[in-house]
Amino acid sequence: MIHYDMLEGDVMEKDCLVFTKSSWIRAHVSGMFLWKKKSGDLVQMNEIIGEINEPYGLKKSPVKANRDGFIIGHNNGTVILQGEALFHIGYEWEKYSSKKSR
């Protein structure tokens, strides 16, 4: 609201990223989903970012990043089905400043 002169004070300047390309990582099996990385984290291709456990705990399947980028969204559900979206990865971006211009 400071930015729109509705309140007095100083506007904090902060850089932000605007993603121009993104992709989804989907579950290759059904099971219990545990994410190891969260939204906002920078990930590398083939890095393990989560795992899917078989209901009886006998088999664990790693979920790996399909490219370098930032996680811009993830599934919070515990029980997931094969094909369900798990992570949204932004991999091309532009940097913008929130500096106020008059």
Image: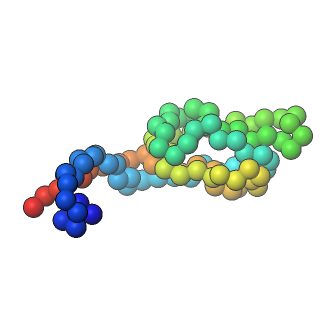
Indicate left or right for 22 with 11 as reference.
Answer: right
Indicate left or right for 54 with 92 as reference.
Answer: right
Against 59, residue 86 (above or below) is below
User: Where the C terminus falls, by quadrant?
Assistant: bottom left
Closer to the camera, 41 or 90? 41
Give the farthest residue toward the left: 102
Query: Splitting the image into 4 quarters, where does residue 47 fall?
Result: top right
Against 36, residue 39 (above or below) is below
For the point 19% across and 51% down, the residue is: 10
Query: Splitting the image into 4 quarters, where does residue 81 fall?
Result: bottom right
Horizontal and vertical percent position of residue 8: 19, 59
Horizontal and vertical percent position of residue 91: 43, 46
For the point 78% across and 46% down, the residue is: 32
Closer to the camera, 10 or 26? 10
State whether residue 94 appears in this view: yes
User: Where the N terminus falls, by quadrant?
Assistant: bottom left
Horizontal and vertical percent position of residue 28: 72, 47
For the point 46% across and 37% down, the residue is: 42
User: Total number of numbered labels?
Assistant: 0
Indicate left or right for 9 with 83 as reference.
Answer: left
The figure's colour scheme reads: rainbow
Horizontal and vertical percent position of residue 60: 78, 35
For the point 27% across and 46% down, the residue is: 14
Indicate left or right for 73 with 78 as reference.
Answer: left
State whether residue 4 appears in this view: no
